[in-house]
């Protein structure tokens, strides 16, 4: 198991929602000995399961084993998670986009043009600063979540192995799309380091396709 125990930890001081992200791979090394780095540096298609827990007005577990996505809400009276959101499906498009727009001037041209496009469409900007919280809204209401490269974080800021890959599995299993800023499906990326970073474009499939068109049109040649 690979886990990000406290996603959005900078929100704790101001009592804003945080979460936990986890994923499960099959062990490759012999069970008789210690595990090794190869047990963790596996590509997305090898994921057995992925999920997140959102700690908000209620505690919700969203979970997939590769056969759709279900949500479970904690019932404190019995101490159990009860199925509350079966077969979650992300809408084809939504009325929200989620990005740290304070970095607008530090984004590449294609990202700035897409943000302008969202503004022209009067889409609502919703950014909490906790990936789990921002994605959870998109799971139910649709929209797009963006964490692009900046001048300081040229490879993005979110971690591929324990943030981007498990959330990508959940998003895809709910009918959404997830790619990086180079138009590569996130689940097809091969992790080379436990803390490797990754740019992110994920959410409603129609909106991810639109972002892909902006990258193809405005990005600088490699």
Image (cartoon, helix red, strand yellow):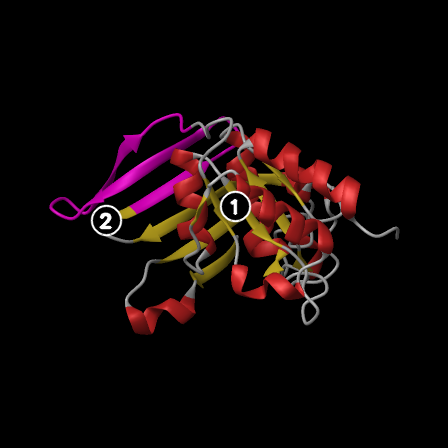
* Residue sitting nearer the eye, 75 or 29: 75
Residue at the image point whose x is 61% and y is 59% from the top: 159
Farthest residue in the left direction?
Answer: 77
Dot 2: what SS?
Answer: loop
Residue at the image point whose x is 59% and y is 48% from the top: 116
Label whose residue precedes the other's in the sequence (1 or 2): 2
The answer to whether 51 appears left or right of 30 in the picture is left
Residue 79 lies in the magenta-colored region: yes
Tag shown at residue 156: none
Q: Quadrant of residue 213?
A: top right
Residue 11 lies, with reference to residue 52, above or below; the image says: below
Q: Quadrant of residue 149?
A: bottom right
The region drawn magenta spans 60-88
Residue 151 lies, with reference to residue 80, above or below; the image says: below
Residue 180 lies, with reference to residue 33, above or below; the image says: above
Q: Quadrant of residue 198?
A: bottom right
Farthest residue in the right direction?
Answer: 222
Q: Residues within 10 Å of mark 2 (few under 14, many from 20)?
A: few
Residue at the image point whose x is 55% and y is 54% from the top: 163
Number of callouts in the render? 2
Q: Residues within 10 Å of mark 1 (few under 14, many from 20)?
A: few
- The secondary structure that most of the magenta stretch takes on is strand
* Residue sitting nearer the eye, 186 or 216: 216
Q: Are marks 1 and 2 in contact (CB under 8 Å)?
A: no
Dot 1: what SS?
Answer: helix
Q: Position of residue 54 (x, y in %)?
A: 35, 51
Q: Which residue is mark 2?
A: 58
Residue at the image point whose x is 78% and y is 41% from the top: 217
Q: Which residue is mark 1?
A: 119
Q: Position of residue 119 (x, y in %)?
A: 52, 46
Residue 136 lies in the magenta-colored region: no
């Amino acid at each position: 198991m690979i886990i990000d125990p406290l996603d959005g930890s900078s929100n704790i001081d101001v009592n804003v929602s945080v979460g936990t992200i986890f994923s499960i791979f099959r062990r490759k090394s012999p069970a008789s000995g210690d595990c090794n780095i190869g047990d963790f540096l596996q590509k997305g298609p090898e994921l057995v399961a992925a999920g997140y827990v959102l700690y908000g007005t209620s505690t919700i577990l969203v979970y997939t084993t590769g056969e759709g996505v279900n949500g479970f809400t904690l019932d404190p009276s019995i101490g159990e998670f009860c199925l509350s959101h079966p077969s979650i499906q992300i809408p084809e498009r939504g009325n929200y986009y989620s990005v740290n727009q304070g970095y607008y001037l530090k984004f590449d041209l294609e990202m700035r043009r897409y943000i302008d496009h969202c503004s022209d469409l009067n889409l609502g900007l919703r950014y909490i600063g906790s990936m789990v919280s921002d994605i959870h809204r998109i799971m139910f209401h649709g929209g797009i979540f963006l964490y692009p490269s900046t001048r300081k974080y040229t490879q993005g800021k979110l971690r591929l192995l324990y943030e981007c890959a498990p959330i990508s599995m959940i998003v895809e299993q709910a009918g959404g799309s997830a790619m990086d800023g180079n138009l590569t499906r996130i689940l097809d990326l091969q992790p080379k380091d436990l803390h490797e970073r990754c740019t992110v474009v994920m959410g409603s499939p129609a909106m991810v396709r639109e972002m892909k068109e902006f990258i193809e049109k405005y990005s600088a040649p490699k």
